[in-house]
Each structure stands twice: as structure tokens, then as C-alpha cells.
Image (cartoon, rainbow, N blue to C red):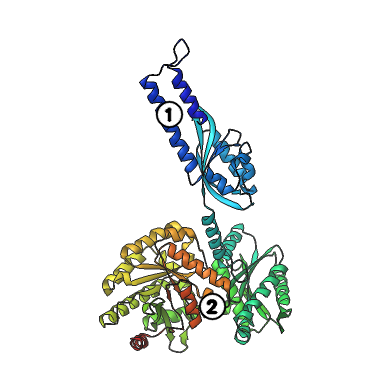
Amino acid sequence: MLPESRARSEQEAGRAVESDGFPEETPESQEVTRQLQESEQRYRSLFENNVDVVVTFGLEGKFLQMNRATEQLLGIPAKELVGTPFLQMIVPERRAHSEREFFRVLEGTPVQYQTAVYNRRREVIDLHVTVIPIHYEGEITGIHCIGKDITKQKQLERKLNQLAYFDPLTGLPNRNSLDTNLSRQVGERRKFALLALDLDRLKAVNETWGREAGDRLLKIIAHRLRDFLPSSADFFRNSGDDFIVTYYCDTDDECLGFARSLEARLRDPVVLGEIELSITSRIGISTFPDDGIDPDALLRKADTAMFAARRNGRNRVAFYRDVKSKDDARQFQLEIALRSAIANDELSLAFQPQIDLATGEVHGLEALLRWLHPQHGQVPPDQFIPVAEESGLIHEIGMWVIEAACRQAVEWNHAGLGNLPVSVNISIHQFYDDEFAGQLENVIRVSGMDPSRLVLEITESISSNSDVVVAQLHRFKAIGVRIAIDDFGTGYSSLRYLKDFPVDYLKIDRSFVDHLESNEKERRLVATITALAHNFGLQTIAEGTETAEQVAIMRELGADHAQGYHFSRPLAPDALVSWLAARA
């Protein structure tokens, strides 16, 4: 019998003791005894048979009792633990917090928190614990603790965090880490330089010796620069062969000297097997606060300077301030031309099919914006979309894309080509526009589009303000449209928004697909993404599938759908109709 129950039993029995010292067996005392025994048995069953950890501590924090689940989880028998302090089991970095929470319970406050302990093999076990005081006759006589093993959940979170914040190939912090770092540095209000660094030979290496050689080159460069950089610099892989370095400096001369040292370090030959390569680079520099106080603006301006350095030849360094006047003029001319493009119907849509990997049937289409300039020909989206966003034209252009996509989808459906879902990309500016949801609903109503056949593609960067995002997404879902997270794995990946956001699809970024044939780590990452998606009831779409082998691997790894040049490049509406007819 447990100490508390025994004390209550003796107290009740004592009430029936007569002057001769012997208890009188009455029906009432027998019923009390029976109830106490039944209560004792229920409590002991709950204690001993619980699948979770259940422990009783003394007021000094030492083990008094524990159930079998505790012994099994820790791999330590109760006889070894009884009388020892629980704090010695806690991992060092969690001990102070666990001790503070224990003292709160001693003051009478139940608490819940997460902690971590060592088992006998010194493996770390993550626990979610509920700790409550034991009260008897108005005093705290001990502590109960119930712990749930959350080790697998924490491992999954850590894996996703690694995926979200670090580049799987080089191990460097990725664009998401860069965004976090820049926000912090801007908040410090201290002068720093942002250097955009671009390698020159990666494409040639990939084409000549294969992507595996290109990957080795990237790893060598990443490790070389990471070991070379001072503590005042941070190093990130932005994408492909683009790297970003942030560096605290007081003068432009100091910054230029640092950039020159990076350039010189990169010129050292790289040995790939029996091949020796000389690497060339371009570095573009923007500085805070001289070139701006917004992280995106600093990145954009460093890129502008880097492209200017590229035009000037290899192994060149350029400051944004040295090229900004020409760039500003070009951007202004592009904005004027873009305004004319809307008025003169120079914009059009191309559609890229998405294929169901299980059936081989067309699952849907992604609508992609194209601009055919009357003098300059096709203008790449990565040139005019940033201009549209900076000038505010993105709202008008974005609604035009949705209207045109809905009209085209309804026209095809009436022509008997099927009611295929159509995806459109929406920018962060549209997403946070309070009027966007109403405009979207009106477009769907006027066009006659089935809202469930329209998929809005958002990027992971939108998820940075989760509370607002959830509310806005629910507004879209109330209209009946579906939601896809585009370029998944390159930005703010988080278990929280997979759990909270009402989305339907995850689009696996093409950077994970590129190296599937030769990179086992990439395969494991894709398998993790598909498993996560399916666990949350989402479907996956693999972007950039260009080979039959990539398609086969994606199917094997559990992806639901795929799009890419293996199936079809983006097609004009008439060409898409012919493509669909050829598949019929």
C-alpha cells in the first residue's frame, strides 16, 4: 500500500477503536476498507501499467518510485535509481530549467515542459513532462511526474530544421538562414557588407565531367572559403553556384580588401581526381546602410553589382554604387515598357503539364507568365517580375494571370478537353493584399471556373508571419480554391505550418530533383519530404523532372505527381491542345 493510502486507512480504522484497543468490525468500516483497497488497486494499476513514464520524487528531488515503463525507457532498474537525484539524469543544458520548474512545483504549481534525459547507453531521450505536487492534509509531501517520450518527434523536427536552414550538399547555411542572419544584422545598426559571389566554371564542369564532379567542386569551394573566413564573416549558399558572404567592416577599402582576398583564395587550383581546375569568380558588393536598410534590397543590389562584374570579365569585384546609375535607368525603362505590355496585350500564358506518377495521366497544369516585347523579344520573368513587384504592377499583372488562366481552363473544359486543375503563382505582395481574396472570388464567379480546380501556389517565405498567413489561407479556402507550397525545402520549412496551414500540395523544389541519380542524401531528403506530406494528408509534386530515371526515382520515393521537361516544356495554349491530343 502507498504511504498516503496507508495513512488514510489507519485514520479511518482508528475511528472504530473502542476502549479495549480492538477495532469493531462494522459494515461501515468494512465498506471503508473495501473502498480504500479498491482505490489503492486502481491507483497502482494506473501507476504500474501506464505506457508513459510515471515517477514519484521526494521533496529533495530523489527517486522514490517508478513504473516499469520508466525502467524500460531508461534501461535502468528501479533499485539503482531509488534514492538518487533526478537532476543527474537530465542533459546538462536542460538541468537549470528543470531545477527551476521543480522548485515551482514545490511551491504548489503544477507545470508542463519539455526536457531531455540520458538512458543507460548515454543516449538522449526527449520527454514532455507533467509535474504535479502531492498534497496531504494541506501540505506537499512529494512530487508526481508523468513523462511522454517525444524523441521521434524531436528527431523529425531536427531533421526538418536541418532541411530548412542548411544546404544538404555543402552543409552551409542556406537562404533561410541568410534571411534570419540579415534581419539580425540590420537590427544591430552596424555597418556591414553583403558580398554576392558567383563561380564561373560550374556549368562547364557539369557538362564535361558530370554533375557528380560539379558537386565535388562546390563542396571543395565551400569548405575552402569556410575555413578561410574570419569570425566577423558569415557564409551562405544561396543557390546553384551562388554564395553570399556578410562581413562587418568600417570602410569601403577594408571591404574591398576582404573581397580581393576571397577572389585570390578562389584562384588556387582545385583538384578533382586527376583534373586540376582554375576557378574564376565575380563578386558584387552592397553595404548597409549606404545601399539600403532592407535585406531584400541589399541582396538585390549585390546581385546587380555581381552581374556588372560579370560583364567586365572574370575575377572582378564591383560595388553597387559604381553601377547603380546605369541599373536605375534600365529598371526605369523596363517599368515603362512593362506598363505598355499590359496595355498592348504583350503578356501571355504558357502551360506546363503535371503528371500523375501512379497512372501516367495528366493531373493538372501550371500557368506560367510570358512577356514578348515587340523589339527585344522574350523578356525572362526573373527580369520583369522584380520590377513589377517594386513598382506595384504585380497586383495588376497577378490578377491578369488568374483571369487568363481561369478563362482558358473554362474554355478547354467546354471544348471537352477535361476539367483539369490549373495552378497559378501568387506573389507575397498579392498574398498580403486585403482586397485580393475579394478580387479572386469575383474572377472565379465571372469566369465560371470551378474554384476547386484552381490552385494558388505560394512560396515558403510567405510563412514568416504565421498567424496572418493562417487567417489569409482560410479566406482562400473558404472560396474553394486549393493551396500549394512552391519550392518546398528551400525556405522556411517548419512542422508548425505543415500542421496549421490549410494547404493541399507540397511542390518539391527542382534543386532536390537535379541530383537524385547520383546523390543518396538527396534521395533520403525527398523521401522525408514525401513522408511528411503524406503524414499531413498532402500530395507532392516534383518540379524539374528532366529524365526518365528521375521520374522513376520520384515514383519509388513516393511522390504523387511530377512536372518537367521529361514530360513537356511549358506550351502555348494551342500547342498544349495538340500535346493533349497526341496523348489521347
Q: Nearer the viewer, residue 448 or 168?
A: 168
Q: Residue 409's mark?
A: none
Q: Nearer the viewer, residue 274 or 340?
A: 274
Can you tell which quarter of the image residue 368 is in?
bottom left
What element does badge 2 sit on?
A: loop
Q: Is residue 288 left or right of residue 18?
A: right
Q: Nearer the viewer, residue 441 or 556?
A: 556
Residue 576 in the image: state x and y as whole percent.
36, 85
Q: Earlier in the sequence, mark 2 or mark 1?
A: 1
Q: Nearer the viewer, residue 539 or 482?
A: 539
Can you tell which quarter of the image residue 65 is in?
top right
Q: What's the residue type where badge 1 is placed?
A: Leu
* Image quarter (top left, top right, bottom left or bottom right) of the C terminus: bottom left
Instruction: Determine crowd level at label 2: few under 14, some 14-19, many 20+ residues with C-alpha closer than 10 A.
Output: some
Answer whether labels 2 and 1 touch (C-beta < 8 Å). Answer: no
- 351, above or below 67, in the image: below
Q: Name the residue that disc number 2 marks.
A: 514
Residue 147 in the image: state x and y as whole percent.
52, 45
Q: Nearer the viewer, mark 2 or mark 1?
A: 1
Q: Residue 36's mark?
A: 1
Residue 164 in the image: state x and y as whole percent.
54, 64
Q: What's the residue type where badge 2 is placed?
A: Asp
- Label 2 vs label 1: CA separation? 68 Å
